[in-house]
Image (cartoon, rainbow, N blue to C red):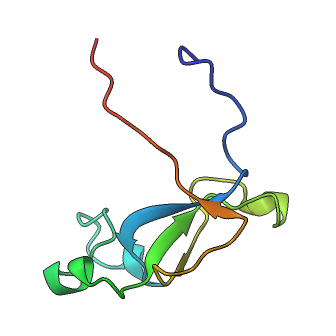
Amino acid sequence: NAFGLADTIGNVWEWCRDVYATDSYRKDPRDRDGLHGEEEATSASASRVHRGGSWFYLAVHARSADRTGGAPGIRASDLGVRPSRVVTE
């Protein structure tokens, strides 16, 4: 790609801002951001989505659509973040 990035899936599960719920995408299909209401979305203790699998799991989990969740205080060697920014041309 134009940014020189390759093989970025599968290094660590990636923290997401979305509130985790097992049925997130079975609800209103227009609500694709995974949030379920302002109170839950802003709660510091609400479980958050982890995406993408990690080196510690089977290869089948190394895809961006693979998701699980956990409490915001969890720390693990196979859990991290993916920094991002808006690119303007």
Rendering coords of residue 85 (x, y %): 35, 35
Residue visible at 72% across and 51% down in the picture: 11
Where is 41 relative to 80, above or below?
A: below
Left or right position of 88 against 77: left
- The front one of 89 and 78 is 78
Where is 4 relative to 28, above or below?
A: above
Left or right position of 24 against 14: left
Residue visible at 43% across and 75% down in the picture: 48
Count of residue discs: 0
Residue visible at 73% across and 60% down in the picture: 54
Rendering coords of residue 44 (x, y %): 31, 83
Rendering coords of residue 23 (x, y %): 43, 83
Rendering coords of residue 38 (x, y %): 15, 79
Q: Quadrant of residue 87?
A: top left
Quadrant for the N terminus in the image? top right
Q: Quadrant of residue 8?
A: top right
- The front one of 70 and 37 is 70
Q: Quadrant of residue 53?
A: bottom right
State the residue lying farthest toward the left: 38
Residue visible at 62% across and 57% down in the picture: 52
Quadrant for the C terminus in the image? top left
Where is 41 relative to 86, above or below?
A: below
Where is 23 relative to 4, above or below?
A: below
